[in-house]
Each structure stands twice: as C-alpha cells, then as structure tokens.
Image (cartoon, grey):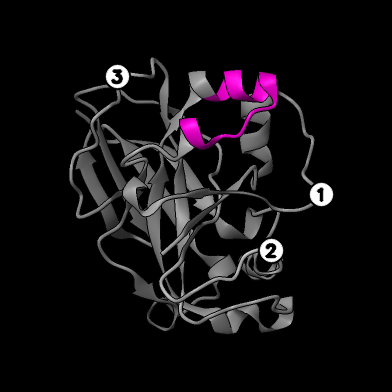
Amino acid sequence: MKIICIGRNYVEHIQELDNNSNIPEAPLFFLKPDTALLRNNEPFYVPAFSNDLHYETELVVKINRVVKAIDEKFAGRCYDEVGLGIDFTARDIQRKCMEKGLPWEICKAFDHSAALSSQFVKLEELGKNVQELRFEMFFNGELRQSGDASKMIFGVNHIISYVSHFITLKIGDLIFTGTPVGVGPVKPGDHITAKLEGRTMLDFDIK
C-alpha cells in the first residue's frame, strides 16, 4: 500500500506558504510509507526533531483496482470511496529542504505523519461527485480549514491519470489530494476534529 500526496493543489494555500501565485503546471506528488499512517484516532505525538510541526487537512481517495497509465476520462472507475487525512509536515525542516533543493521525505514521510480517518464513505452514499465534496477541520473547537474540492487546481481524475503514468497504482493505495488554506502549527494539548460533508471523520489529540 502506497500513500501518494499531492502538494500545492489549492491556490490560496500556495499563497499562504510563499506569498505568490506560481501555479504548478502538473500535479506535484511525493510518497509516504505505510509506517506514516496514524489510524483509529490515536493521538499524534509531536516529534522531537521539529520545532514547527504543521497540520494539513486533505480529502483522501482510496484506489480500488490496479491502474497503469490510465486516461483521465476513465479514472473515475478507479475509486468509489473517500475519507479524510492530515498530512503532518515538519515545516522548519521543509524550508531547509526547499532552500537546498533536497527531497521532502524527511519532513513529510516520518512515522505517523499521515493521520487517516478510520472510515471511508462511498461516493454513492454521499450522493455527490468527488469534485463537489466539502470538508472542514476544527482546531481546538475553532474552524481552521474549509475545503471545497471544486477549487482543486488538479481534480482527482487528472491526478490519478497523471500519477499512474509514472507509478502503477494498486488496490488500497491512498491519494491525499492536497490541503486548502488555513494550515498551522500544532503543540501538545491541541485537538483536531475533521468532518466530511458534516460527518465526523477525525477526532484526536496532539501530545
């Protein structure tokens, strides 16, 4: 099982990170190992190696078949359920990596850096196209992120098609589709709750 993460997929998030509107020409993706998963609303422990650890709430799509170099118009057949996730990022380490042109794994792929909802919901049950979905993240009870999949720079089907031309996707692979504006730091004692179309999907403590 692979975790494929899409970076810089909402314009306002790009602007909050680097104060410009340099829109990527193609999906920017990186991988996390299965050891990055944080399941069942278990607490997230802030790692000692970062002094600036951020949350990024994302819509997560689960692949339901083997996919290789698929055309975008057929990519909708490759998933039928969605969840939510948090891409935890060591922002201080990420800045150093970006300055030196280094890979991102050290700041993105560490243990438990991918919190995943314990449940996935069928699109049929939600009654919406994936690009119509909305999600919210509450930080210590305060709304911090409000995601609207229609505002993605690259839609889910385009992402699947693009990634599958480089990497074969398999059943159970997860695609974190990018985070909207509103990311921020976490510290011990904080609490995160995330909802998909009003359904509570994540609800866990930061320690």
Mark closest to the chain's N terminus, 3 or 1 = 1
Mark closest to the chain's N terminus, 3 or 2 = 3
Query: Residue at position x 43%, y 83% from top?
Result: 124
Q: Which segment is the magenta one?
A: 94-106
**In the rendered view, would you say 61 is above or below 145?**
below
The residue under label 3 is 48
Q: Residue furthest top?
A: 51
**In the rendered view, would you say 203 is above or below 53?**
below
**In the rendered view, would you say 164 is above or below 100?**
below
Left or right of residue 198: residue 188: left
Q: Position of residue 149 (x, y in %)?
A: 57, 58
Query: Residue at position x 24%, y 28% from top?
Result: 190
Which kind of residue does numbered mark 2 sit on?
A: Phe
| Front in this rendered view, residue 3 or 141 | 3
The label nearer to you, 3 versus 2, is 2
The label nearer to you, 1 versus 2, is 2
Which kind of residue does numbered mark 1 sit on?
A: Glu
Which kind of residue does numbered mark 3 sit on?
A: Ala
Q: Where is residue 17 in the image (x, y as percent from the top left)?
A: 62, 27
| Front in this rendered view, residue 166 or 43 | 166
Q: Where is residue 43 in the image (x, y as percent from the top left)?
A: 19, 39
The answer to if 163 sits in the magenta stretch is no
CA–CA distance in space, label 3 to label 1: 35 Å
The label nearer to you, 3 versus 1, is 3
CA–CA distance in space, label 3 to label 2: 34 Å
Q: Which mark, by number, is residue 25?
A: 1
The residue under label 2 is 166
Label 3 element class: loop
Q: How many labels does the image show?
A: 3
